[in-house]
Amino acid sequence: MLFGIVALSVVGMSWTLVGIVMGSAPRKGIDPGLVQLFGAVCSVLIGAILLFLLPQKHPAVRECLFPCLLYFSGGFLNCIMLLLMSKAMQHGPNGIIWVIIQSAMIFPFLTGIIFFHVEPKPVRITGLLLILTSLVLFGLCKNNEVKGGGWKAVSFLAFLLTGVVLNCSSLPSYFESGQNVPPILRSVCTAAGTLTIAVLVTVFNRKKIPVRANLRSKYLWFFVGSLQFFGLIFAYLLLYPGMDAMAKNGNGSASHPLLISSCIIGFSLYSVFILREKSSVWQYMAMAGCLSGIVMICR
């Protein structure tokens, strides 16, 4: 259990880099969709090479087919979700939209309780409510200026997709067949799903995306390289083994609350100490609430 908590907290903190890159890419004239596309290409190629070179036990195709389909679906839908979130944030209050989408972590938590007999201890429920309250506080502390209309329906659809994505990545850890799938293969399947939809979106929008100019930019490759360096190492060594450890100890539903809360705390620390953004008392209270919720939900 301790390994799972530490591993997932570290992975969640590392996801701060995704927010930094996605925020910086448009300012450098780089299309975020291309960052996802080439990142997925790197992930699939590196994963395939490692699967071929490293000696490891591979489960039978029949055994790992369903888990791999879930990981593929998660990567596919996650790319769509990010595009919807980006569209919503162009027309609505970013803070509220972020809170709505991140609140989807309640889906895998409730799935574990309803279908996999995860004990709904009062302390865990209280911890979840505390995390959700903290997320709301973080959203209210951000700039919620509305820049247009029509964002609510898009945000709600992204919220539902996020719930499906989170369940796709967490469900296999509840089954022995899923736990037997090597972490590298899990990452390859997820990246393959992302690559599939990213290629389709790029081809469909090829007239609107300056692909050639982006390919010549050093920033595109810097963003892709930095995300893949940390993302692949942490996915192989920490993310999936951590989720398996949590599920084996009867608390698999706490995996995504841990990841998301750690990610929020990580980005808040980045904003305070790197960007030197001013923070309010409410933001510090929200951070304290997230930390307390993490401890409670893992009891």
Image (cartoon, helix red, strand yellow):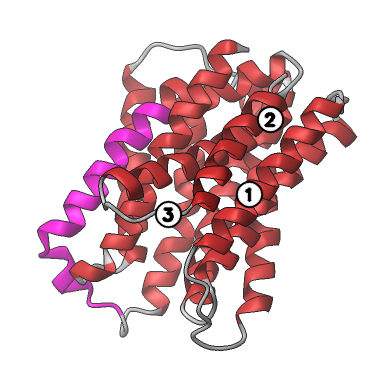
State whether the magenta stretch is mostly helix, strand or loop. Answer: helix
Find disc 2 in the rendering and name its residue: 254
Relative side of 96 to 46, left or right: right
Mark 3: few/some/many CA within 10 Å (<14, 14-19, 20+): many
The quadrant of the picture occupied by the C terminus is top right
Cα separation between marks 2 and 1: 15 Å
Q: Which is more N-terminal, label 1 or label 3?
A: 1
Where residue 221 appears, as percent x and y from the top left, is: 18, 52
Q: Amino acid at mark 2?
A: Ala
Query: Please, is residue 150 above or below residue 56 in the view?
Result: below
Q: Nearer the viewer, residue 63 or 281?
A: 281
Q: Which is more N-terminal, label 1 or label 2?
A: 1
Relative side of 31 to 81, left or right: left
Q: Which one is closest to the eye, mark 3 or mark 1?
A: 1
Mark 1: few/some/many CA within 10 Å (<14, 14-19, 20+): many
Find disc 3 in the rendering and name its residue: 195
Find disc 1 in the rendering and name its residue: 165
